[in-house]
Amino acid sequence: QVQLVESGGGLVQPGGSLRLSCAASGIIFSINDMGWYRQAPGKQRELVATITNSGSTNYADSVKGRFTISRDNAKNTVYLQMNSLKPEDTAVYYCNADVKRSVWRTPINYWGQGTQVTVSS
């Protein structure tokens, strides 16, 4: 099957930056939409940003102007550049992707295990 592995999380001060990466591996024909979601303790998982195969992006209002999502199709990898981080950005960040394992298969949605981002002074 397909595995999504996130990396790049950690502890940063308010106003700092982090760059998250998510690499998809396994049997992959193509990947359609990819995205980042986050979940803070006691809260629902929420969409952070998505990016289509052609590069069209969508952001949550709370991160517009601060976060940038991008992808490298050759590496089956999606990135999230996070700038001007705020304490309210603290959450577990999850990678998500719609993956086609062959030209004839419908896409299957996959989740990574998550990476912790903590913004604190």
Image: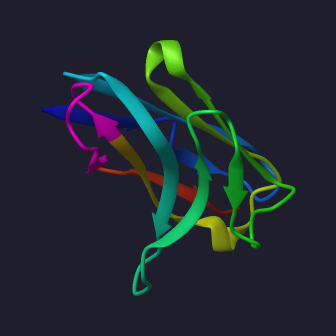
78 vs 28: above or below: below
Front residue of this view, candidates 52 and 63? 52
Question: According to the image, what is the colour scheme of the structure?
Answer: rainbow
Give the magenta range: 99-112
Is 97 or 65 nearer to us in this picture?
97
Residue drawn at x 32%, y 37% is: 99
- The location of residue 100, given as percent across then percent down, is 28, 34
* Image coordinates for residue 62, horizontal then vertical, percent: 75, 72
Task: In this rendered view, identify the residue nearer to me: 86 or 58.
Answer: 58
For the N terminus, the quadrant is: top left
- 55 with respect to 95 (left or right): right
Instruction: Judge left or right: residue 34 versus residue 104.
Output: right
Residue 15 found in image quarter: bottom right
Task: State the residue at coordinates (72%, 54%).
Answer: 13
Toward which corner of the image does residue 23 lie, by quadrant? top left
- Image point 22% across, 25% down: which residue? 102
Q: Is residue 109 magenta?
A: yes
Near-viewer residue (104 or 65): 104
Which residue lies most toward the top here? 74
| Residue 58 horizontal/vertical position (percent) | 69, 57
Q: Considering the image in quadrants, where does the C terminus appear?
A: bottom right
Q: Residue furthest right?
A: 65
Residue 72 in the image: x percent, y percent? 57, 21
Q: Is residue 97 above or below residue 30?
A: below
Residue 115: say if magenta. no
Quadrant for residue 29, please give it: top left
Label total for image = 0
Q: Residue furthest front?
A: 104
Which residue lies most toward the left here? 1
Report the residue at 19% width, 21% height from top. Answer: 27
